[in-house]
Image (cartoon, helix red, strand yellow):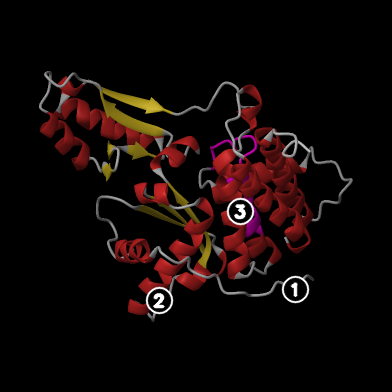
């Protein structure tokens, strides 16, 4: 059996504001906006995979992101000493929205396609937010992991604001992929 | 050689497959598959498990060369099948190094111009080297 040294993961210097923001976001369960945090269980021993989708990662090297996420969980734990999460974090992945799209994290998306003079843009934003769209640095994004959820939201948006000319899109990968 | 010959993208292209081979070899080894054992029977079962337990959708098909799914499967299977989860820093490093490779690498690189810099190549090489070094510990 190999021996794996249990070395501490050092939080990178210079990212304190980002760590603080993420730690605060861990408290905002169920609320709208970035970052979007997924905690998928590994099952055994209560461990979980965390995926944090956030525009702010654009300015952070990929190699640093896991340590930032871990440190944010440690700070969260300081306020929740009875239910610490950091020791259960099995893997932490930080992705920008572009990277999440590239990796197919949300294969389904809904977008409006109307010309600005066809529909009130505020009404479109309200409708998107009402369905759970996330405000990102590149605008509102309405993304879904499942086809069923996307189709239901699409129906509601069609009924609420048909003049927005909604489209339901699916990322199917590239034809070159093999 | 590719990197030294001014082809950092070509080097990255090969590093990605190095990582894929290490991840898959470690995964199959954990299931008791030997180095020379055939994989035809085991592979579809493992991919079904990855879909169900890692991608969390039994109907989902594992994308070819999905390094992230295989890395997470390794962590998952180590905890659930092997009975001894990886130490915390190790699994985080596994995820980080996989993410570094995925930032630059994809199989379809072979069809495109590769605008990768020597710095990108160095970053991915370090990640691939981590996999080679840690393979015995996986």
User: Going 74% across and 49% down the picture, which residue do you hit?
Assistant: B22
Q: From the image, tell me which residue sits under label 3.
A: B97
The question of residue B39 being in magenta is answered with no
> Residue A64, position in %: x, y?
50, 58
The alpha-carbon separation of the residues under discs 1 and 2 comes to 29 Å
Chain of the residue where label 2 is placed in the rendered structure: A
Q: Closer to the camera, B106 or B23?
A: B106
Chain of the residue where label 3 is placed in the rendered structure: B
Q: Can residue A105 be spotted in the picture?
A: no
Q: Are marks 1 and 2 on the same chain?
A: yes
Q: Are marks 2 and 3 on the same chain?
A: no
Q: Which quarter of the figure has residue A44?
A: bottom right
**Within 10 angstroms of label 1, few (less than 14), some, or many (20 or more) residues?**
few
Query: Could you tell me which secondary element the residue under label 2 belongs to?
Result: loop
Q: From the image, tell me which residue sits under label 1.
A: A3
Instruction: Answer above or below: position of A10 versus B138.
Output: below
The stretch of residues the image draws in magenta is B58-77
Q: Closer to the camera, B127 or B88?
A: B127
Residue A83's label in the rendered image is: 2
- Quadrant for the N terminus of chain B in the image: top right
């Amino acid at each position: 059996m190999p021996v794996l040294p249990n070395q501490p993961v050092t939080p990178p210097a210079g990212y304190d504001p980002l760590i603080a923001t993420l730690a605060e976001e861990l408290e905002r369960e169920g609320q709208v906006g970035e970052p979007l945090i997924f905690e998928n269980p590994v099952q055994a021993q209560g461990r979980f995979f965390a995926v944090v989708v956030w525009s702010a990662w654009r300015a952070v090297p990929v190699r640093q992101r896991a340590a930032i996420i871990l440190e944010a969980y440690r700070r969260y734990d300081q306020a929740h000493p009875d239910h610490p999460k950091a020791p259960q974090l099995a893997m932490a992945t930080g992705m920008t929205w572009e990277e999440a799209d590239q990796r197919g994290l949300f294969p389904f998306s809904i977008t409006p396609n109307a010309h600005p003079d066809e529909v009130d843009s505020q009404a479109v934003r309200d409708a998107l937010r009402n369905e759970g769209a996330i405000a990102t640095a590149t605008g509102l994004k309405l993304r879904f992991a499942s086809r069923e959820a996307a189709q239901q939201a699409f129906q509601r948006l069609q009924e609420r604001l048909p003049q927005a000319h909604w489209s339901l899109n699916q990322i199917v990968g590239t034809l070159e992929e093999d | 050689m590719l990197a030294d010959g001014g082809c950092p993208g070509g080097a990255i292209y090969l590093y990605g497959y190095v990582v894929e081979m290490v991840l898959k070899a470690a995964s199959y080894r954990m299931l008791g598959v030997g180095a020379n054992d055939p994989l035809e029977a085991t592979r579809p079962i493992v991919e079904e498990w990855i879909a169900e337990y890692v991608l969390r959708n039994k109907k989902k098909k594992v994308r070819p060369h999905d390094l992230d799914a295989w890395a997470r499967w390794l962590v998952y299977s180590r905890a659930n099948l092997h009975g001894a989860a990886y130490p915390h820093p190790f699994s985080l490093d596994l995820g980080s190094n996989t993410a570094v490779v995925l930032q630059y690498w994809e199989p379809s690189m072979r069809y495109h111009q590769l605008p990768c810099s020597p710095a990108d190549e160095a970053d991915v090489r370090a990640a691939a080297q981590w996999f080679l070094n840690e393979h015995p510990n996986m």
